[in-house]
């Protein structure tokens, strides 16, 4: 009985190693960024947090093909949950992340039960409406959330009881990169599993998957909850690192930005989510610092170019170019 | 009793604004199956043009209104020829992204020339004249809004039911391919319907500026509201849009009067429940 296991074990090792590739790339990239831009760590941390958020959106849009415009709902729930926990319960950052993940997952579960029964424009509408309801609750429940002023003065204790968060943001950056690496491994495992295959099948044709016996609705709810948990982690991380949570975490534009970043890089691929986020955040940052009023022009034109010229995202660019070269030669 | 009447009058006025702005969106989304998130942008452009003409160039309100609507129609024809014609073929996601891109560019354009503050429209003084209805007084403006809404409804009904263009449009809504194969010039029908929708959005944006003030971020701020009206009413249904607008207008107003604070939550929860129960909207056809 042990023989076949032994014979496949090298393959298993390679598979296990290949799961680590995206995380390794991220860690190498983050190390370089850390060394080259030591004074921009807070911006880099924001990029890393958005990457976690966009990767979670890739699970539902890229893998399962569920297009929603309300992903900020889970991010915001995670942020508020982590903020409240650190203000009232425990300053431990990892505990805060856990609570954020649970909050995101619960929100995704409750809203997903309704959302995922619909599709197309209705799904887009309800997902936006859910976020609006949450924003309204957050702005009305002043005693809990601080209303329009938001939660301020969130402080977190030292990481693992050892590393204090410093003013330059070194610990915060390393902490965020570690969380991103962990999330990437998790997503790789998920995508490679039979569950991940079922999701891609649903993306291709839901009715075909239903015909071969996949419980489509249940699979969708499951992936929505997992993505919600990861989005909650991203929100919690943002709350801990910046020390504040405002009702703008439930803004429509956050959900739209996430979609743009994913499509920009290429939906359905983890690298696409990472590259799209990086590019969007940098362009946004540079455009906003050159002209704080008119960066929307840049984003708007970028969107049109992506949709018209590169509908499969930047990751498809090398393939396009290669085909073009082959045709001309 | 007078409270209920107040809610009804305010709600109907608000609903008429919603109707004028979103009926065009309902036609374009129903006819062309395109999710046009930039629709509110046409209302913004109309309002911005009137602001420009009345406050900076001292044109009287009525001619400014007509020029602004005409200008928006021209812009929409240009955009349709240059961009939207290609967007029709995209999938849902591509349409969402492309039209978000267009709305960003519209916002940035208004922002560049007029800034991001609220743009007052030089409305004539008669708009604020109070009209006594017996149970309360009402600014004349509300009456104008309600009457224009009814005129738009009647005009659209006439256009759809009694004219050749209406027949073509309904044919194209029901089955684009069959309509085209019968010799109907569907690209032209699309163009006219799109321009009509944009023009109506401009009318609604200008007349509704008292309730939904014009500013650069107008299309994003109210986009959800317009889309909700359309999806609650049902895509492509004029009567559905009308019922949904009036219903949502009254519901939202009632929420604000009776449950201040939680009214908006109540409003959105009602919509989530309604859409969960009837994904195609009140008057929508199953797709």
Image (cartoon, coloured by chain):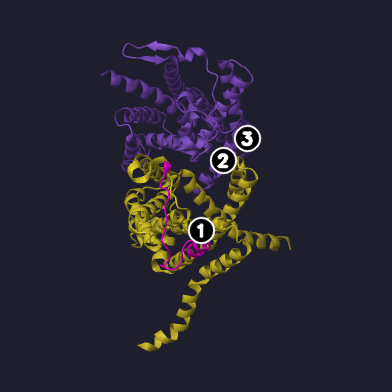
Chain colours: A yellow, B purple
Q: Is residue A276 above or below residue B18?
A: below
Mark 1 crowd level (few <14, some 14–19, many ≥20, 10 Å Cα): many
- Of all chains, the one bearing label 3 is B
Secondary structure at badge 2 equals helix
Whether residue A150 is in magenta: the answer is yes
In the image: residue B194, left or right of residue B58: left
Q: Could you tell me which residue is drawn at 54 percent across and 24 percent down?
A: B120
The span picked out in magenta is A149-177
Question: Which of the labelled discs sits on residue B112, or is there none?
Answer: 3
Labels 3, 2: front one: 3
User: Could you confirm whether marks 3 and 2 are on the same chain?
Assistant: yes
Q: Is residue A89 above or below residue B204?
A: below
- The spot of residue B91 in percent (x, y) is 51, 48
Residue that label 2 marks: B104
Whether residue B282 is in magenta: the answer is no
Secondary structure at badge 1 equals helix
User: Could you confirm whether marks 3 and 1 are on the same chain?
Assistant: no
Image quadrant in which the N terminus of chain A is located: bottom left
- The spot of residue A271 in percent (x, y) is 54, 63
For the image shown, how many numbered marks are present on the structure?
3
Indicate which disc, 3 or 2, sits on the residue closer to the N terminus. Answer: 2
Residue that label 1 marks: A51
Image quadrant in which the C terminus of chain A is located: bottom right
Using the numbered discs, state the Cα–Cα distance from disc 3 to disc 1 in whole angstroms. 31 Å
Labels 1, 2: front one: 1
The answer, for residue A140, to whether it is visible in the render is: yes
Most distant residue in the right direction: A329
Using the numbered discs, state the Cα–Cα distance from disc 1 to disc 2 in whole angstroms. 23 Å
Mark 3 crowd level (few <14, some 14–19, many ≥20, 10 Å Cα): some
């Amino acid at each position: 009985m042990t023989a076949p296991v032994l014979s496949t074990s090298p393959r298993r090792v390679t598979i296990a190693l290949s799961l680590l590739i995206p995380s390794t790339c991220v860690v190498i990239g983050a190390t370089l960024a850390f060394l080259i831009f030591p004074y921009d760590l807070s911006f880099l941390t924001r990029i890393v947090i958005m990457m976690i958020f966009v990767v979670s959106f890739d699970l539902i849009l890229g893998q399962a093909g569920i297009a929603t415009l309300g992903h900020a709902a889970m991010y915001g729930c995670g942020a508020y949950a982590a903020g409240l926990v650190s203000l009232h319960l425990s300053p431990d950052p990892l505990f805060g992340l856990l609570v954020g993940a649970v909050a995101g997952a619960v929100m995704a579960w409750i809203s997903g039960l309704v959302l995922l029964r619909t599709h197309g424009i209705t799904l887009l509408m309800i997902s936006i409406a859910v976020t609006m309801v949450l924003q309204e609750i957050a702005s009305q429940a002043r005693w809990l959330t601080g209303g329009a002023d938001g939660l301020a003065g969130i402080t977190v204790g030292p990481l693992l009881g050892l590393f204090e968060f410093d003013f330059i943001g070194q610990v915060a950056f390393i902490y965020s990169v570690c969380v991103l690496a962990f999330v990437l491994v998790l997503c790789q495992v998920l995508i490679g599993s039979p569950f991940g295959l079922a999701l891609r099948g649903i993306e291709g044709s839901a009715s075909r998957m239903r015909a071969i016996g996949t419980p489509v609705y249940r699979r969708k709810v499951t992936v929505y909850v997992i993505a919600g948990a990861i989005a909650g982690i991203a929100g919690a991380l943002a709350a801990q690192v910046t020390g504040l949570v405002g009702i703008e975490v439930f803004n429509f534009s956050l959900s739209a930005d996430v979609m743009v970043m994913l499509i920009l890089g290429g939906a359905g691929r983890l690298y696409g989510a990472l590259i799209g986020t990086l590019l969007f955040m940098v362009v946004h940052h540079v455009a906003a610092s050159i002209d704080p009023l008119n960066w929307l022009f840049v984003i708007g034109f970028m969107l049109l170019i992506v949709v018209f010229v590169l509908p499969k995202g930047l990751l498809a660019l090398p393939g396009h170019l290669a085909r073009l070269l082959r045709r001309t030669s | 009793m007078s409270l209920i009447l107040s809610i009804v009058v305010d709600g109907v006025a608000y609903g008429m604004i919603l109707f004028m702005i979103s009926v065009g969106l309902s036609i374009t989304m129903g006819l062309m199956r395109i999710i046009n998130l930039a629709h509110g942008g046409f209302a913004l452009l109309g309002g911005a043009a009137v602001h420009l003409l009345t406050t900076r160039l001292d044109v009287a309100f009525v001619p400014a209104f007509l020029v602004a609507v005409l200008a928006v129609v021209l812009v929409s024809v240009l955009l349709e020829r240059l961009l939207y014609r290609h967007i029709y073929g995209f999938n849902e996601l591509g349409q969402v992204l492309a039209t978000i891109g267009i709305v960003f560019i519209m916002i940035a354009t208004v922002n560049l020339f007029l800034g991001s503050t609220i743009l007052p429209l030089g409305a004539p003084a008669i708009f604020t004249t109070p009209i006594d209805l017996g149970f309360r007084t009402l600014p004349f403006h509300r009456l104008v809004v309600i009457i224009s809404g009814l005129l738009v409804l009647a005009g659209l009904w006439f256009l759809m039911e009694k004219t050749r263009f209406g027949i073509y449009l309904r044919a194209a809504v029901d089955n684009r391919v069959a309509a085209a194969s019968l010799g109907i010039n569907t690209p032209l029908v699309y163009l006219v319907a799109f321009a009509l929708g944009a023009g109506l959005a401009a009318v609604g944006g200008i007349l509704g500026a008292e309730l939904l003030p014009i500013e650069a971020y107008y299309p994003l701020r109210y986009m959800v509201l317009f889309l909700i009206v359309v999806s609650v009413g049902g895509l492509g249904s004029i009567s559905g849009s009308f019922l949904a607008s009036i219903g949502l207008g009254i519901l939202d107003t009632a929420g604000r009067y009776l449950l201040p604070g939680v009214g908006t939550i109540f409003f959105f929860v009602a919509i989530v429940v309604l859409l969960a129960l009837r994904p195609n909207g009140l008057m929508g056809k199953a797709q």
